[in-house]
Image: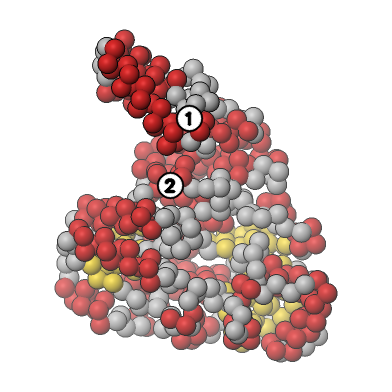
Amino acid sequence: MIHVFEASTLYQVASLSSMLRSGSIDTHGERRVLLLVDSARQPELVPSLREAAGFEALAADFDDVVDFGAALWPLRPHQFAPRRLEQPLFQTLLRAAWGLGEEDVTLYLESLQVNPARALAAVFASSPLVVHADGLMSYGPTRNRLAPEILERVRTLVYLDLVPGLSPALLAEASPRLVAAPLEPFARLIDAWAGALAPSPALQGVIDAAEPTVLVVGQYLSDLGLLTPEHEAEHSRLLLEAALEFGARRIVFKPHPAASASSIGSFHSAARSAGVQVSFIHDAVPAEVVASWLAPVGVVSFFSTTLATLRALGSVPVRAVGTGPLLHALAPFENSNRVPLVLSDALYGDGADAGLAEDPARLQALIDSIAYAMRSEQLPELRSTALRFLAAEPGLRDRYVKQRRLRALGLPHRSPSSPGRAHRAVHGIIKNEEIANKVLSVVRGASDPDGLRRGSRRAAAAVGSRLVTWSKRA
């Protein structure tokens, strides 16, 4: 048996190495091949995975390393999608290119629902599949419906135990064996990695200054279409404010390795507008290694997995910012970033006051309920959990699940007559109950076919005009 491991980032290489060293993945001494699938959107502008500092030490856990991108050039790995008739031919070609011969192969894939992992699973049509996951997205449901011939071959889901006690919903429809890989071996690997490398001169200068430093971990939300450039600029301002609240004398910004120049420029512009000096660090190592070098007083991000990793290791305070506005703006509801966003908000952001971090059972019920609301057809067995939890926890329900979604699925939701956010907001501002109720009647009147149902802008105009009319009469 030959074991082929797909990895698209240096973080994934580190994760796989820690899983092998901890015994979470046991290859029984058989050959291991590391298949590099570089996910950079602009690979010409960033170092390749093989060129990254520390790669050779991580790759020592594998017998061979092959670069899928180099074999496909000028196509990128995510463009690998052979037609069904071509799949046997590609298996022959890949076996020859990777030196697999005629031996049986087990595939260890990451995002099985998208290419190239999905295509590789189809090409190696008889190989057993193991899915490895190292981020918060593993706690959410499978993004796309997988073909039965792929699902039936999924044997195991092995994942970093980023949220202890929480079971993932990923691939639940395949009923795989779940293996939670402990974080301690991963932490030791990160520390060894940091100790074997030298920071860049720019980062070393920050370290030598020995001042309170906050690490800001960037993402590329506008590149993914999750935010407009204007909204990303606003979120960059929130990141800066949160960093200053930690008491930072220095701020270090670590961009996501796949972020575009425009995405990085958004934070640069926000820092310049705020008059805040920021050190931009482009060391080709994960943010966890940078944190090990810096020993920051805090780490700030939107919903990066780095927050979960560092929080689970207990090495530094973390904070998720800007999650609240995104919870209901994120579209469609099935967006695979929803569960990472919810976890970041509930554990490290504004939603942490609900105490879910200290109550694993409630957190599990919340994630199961959201997973059902996202993919009800794939996960019908979670409906009873969703019904119970959403009825018992109206506060969490209204924060994390859209009312329209709840009604569409026949789940517990806020009745039109119950006090909602508008009721609480109006009565919080206007203390005279009679006047407050008149204002509420105007607001609710805008929900007729000429108001809210025509969209938020027309609703605002309808409410505004009715308030003006009412104020003139008052």
Indicate whether 352 appears above or below 446: below
Residue at left offset 24%, top offset 53%: 241
Q: Taking 154 as reference, is 248 left or right?
A: left
Residue 422 can be seen, yes or no? no
* Residue at numbered disc 2: 326
Q: Name the kind of residue labelled 1 in the image.
A: Leu
Give the quarter of the image for residue 210.
Answer: bottom left
Q: Position of residue 428 (x, y in %)?
A: 29, 23
The local secondary structure at tag 1 comes to helix
Residue at left offset 65%, top offset 68%: 115
Q: Position of residue 22 (x, y in %)?
A: 55, 70
Q: Is the C terminus in the top left, top right, bottom left or bottom right quadrant?
A: top left
Indicate whether 99 appears above or below 375: below
Q: Taking 373 as reference, is 425 left or right?
A: left
Q: Position of residue 429 (x, y in %)?
A: 27, 23
Q: Taking 393 as reference, is 373 left or right?
A: right
Residue at left offset 38%, top offset 72%: 261
Residue 200 can be seen, yes or no? yes
* Residue at numbered disc 1: 452
Q: Name the kind of residue labelled 2 in the image.
A: Leu
The local secondary structure at tag 2 comes to helix
The front one of 134 and 428 is: 428
Numbered tag placed on residue 252 in the rendering: none
Q: Is the N terminus in the top left, top right, bottom left or bottom right quadrant?
A: bottom right
